[in-house]
Amino acid sequence: MILEDRTINSFNNTINKLHTEANQPVLEIWGRQQLSGEIKVSGAKNSALAILAGTLLCGEQCRLSNLPNLVDIGRMSQILSALGLKLHRNGDILDIDATHITTSQAPYEIVSRLRASFFVLGPLLARLGVAKVPLPGGCAIGARPVAIHIKGLQALGADVFIEHGVVHANVKGRNGRLKGTKIYLDYPSVGATETILMAATLAEGETIIENAACEPEVVDLANFCKSMGAKIRGAGTNTIIISGVERLHSTDYPIIPDRIEAGTFLVAGAITRSEISVFPVIPEHLTPVIAKLEEIGCQIIAEDTRRLRIVPKELKGVDIETLPYPGFPTDMQAQFTALLTTCEGNSIVTETVFENRLHHVAELQRMGANIKLKGHNAIIKGVHQLSGAPITGSDLRASAAMVLAGLAADGKTLVYGLEHLDRGYENIEEKLRGLGAKIRRLDSLSQELHLVGV
């Protein structure tokens, strides 16, 4: 009787899962299509999110251009609106009136779905002298503690404590301004570097951030703040020096191209053995990605200063280890893991940044990939061909890897988990269709799924 109950429960769970999947949006991909042509890169998501938060520093109007149309950008815009800012979007241009901030508390219902929302803490504190921000949500790719952020703000003179899941921060003293100081980061966290950098722009005196993150997105944020009158030196190196000013002014600022999206499209060319062009790009932002693609066996040609062409040849396995910039980016690990499953020979991918960023391995195995997990290492033996299957992206970059695997696989692949994909890739199926990919988005599979006897 117990066995029968277990069997019935297992059957019911399977049916429930099928019904759930049948009502989810899904990408349908018919693989092994030769791609050609050129594909356009949108503005950098990770730059845009920090810069949107940075507009809180300015008591005037700002205009951002080359802003990607993404779920995460929409959520950050909602947070700014809830704080009292006035926003108007026209295409990739967003006008922001930050003259009035009506509240110092960010709304939980949005913050809980967007980790980058925590970026508003530093600018709110610097501008108002007080801030309340719930602990953030986001992709489940491992521990990304906010302790480094909080420690940095405390070093600048803020009182910070966490109560009932909300970070409370306020500045001591009559004038409500933070005080410049020297801060050493235990780890070169991008988020902590950006939080402290923004807070320090309006602090009294000089702030020095040592062991700072060097990512291009940090440089973009610093350049945005400088365009408003901030005094910042050393962004892009491990020592950033900020001389605080009393106020910042309006600006018109373009977001840099997204290096991770560009890298994903280069891998799309490699995994389908197709020659394509990717633009606009900043080639130096892609140095580690280009180096690995060339080591694998691709030729990367700079057609001009903003356009790269990939020409795949005989592809072989390589070893990859993720590291902070200028090392190989963790945000490209899943895409390269998918690529390496199709390359001749053996590869080892080591994830050192986020401990839970290998969930995509199980989905690639469902497609016939030969991968073994050992700790934070994925040991890969290339196979002749992946096979289409129903697969799910567990996070943003894993979802992109699933799309890439589907492009290379024999037969039809159904990619679920689009709520992750849409957080970081703007109209990805339309862009890939422009290259010749056979891909379409369905609101659900209900009209195509026929469950006999269910």
Image (cartoon, grey):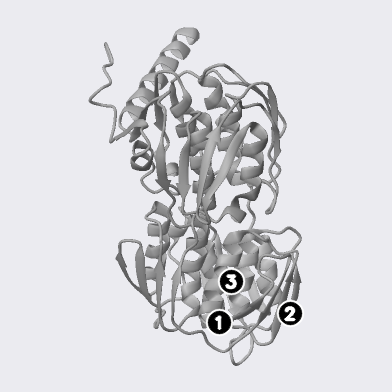
Q: Is mark 3 on a helix, strand or loop?
A: helix
- Please, is residue 16 above or below residue 216 in the view? above
Q: Residues within 10 Å of mark 1 (few under 14, many from 20)?
A: many
At horizontal 70% and vertical 49% (from top left) the residue drawn is 327
Question: Closest to the observer: 305 or 450?
Answer: 305
Q: Quadrant of residue 430?
A: top left
Q: Residues within 10 Å of mark 2 (few under 14, many from 20)?
A: some
Question: Closest to the observer: 285 or 323?
Answer: 285
Q: What element carries label 2?
A: loop
The circle on residue 129 is 1
Residue reaching furthest to the front: 303
The circle on residue 181 is 2
Q: Is mark 1 on a helix, strand or loop?
A: loop
Say which of marks 2 and 3 sits in front.
3
Residue 191 at x, y = what percent?
Answer: 61, 61
The residue under label 3 is 222
Say which of marks 2 and 1 sits in front.
2
Q: Report, in whole angstroms, how far the alpha carbon at label 2 lies from the one at label 3.
A: 18 Å
Left/right placement of residue 242 relative to residue 425 reads right
Left/right placement of residue 414 relative to residue 258 reads left
Residue 449 at x, y = what percent?
Answer: 28, 20
The numbered mark, 2 or 1, whose residue comes first in the sequence reads 1
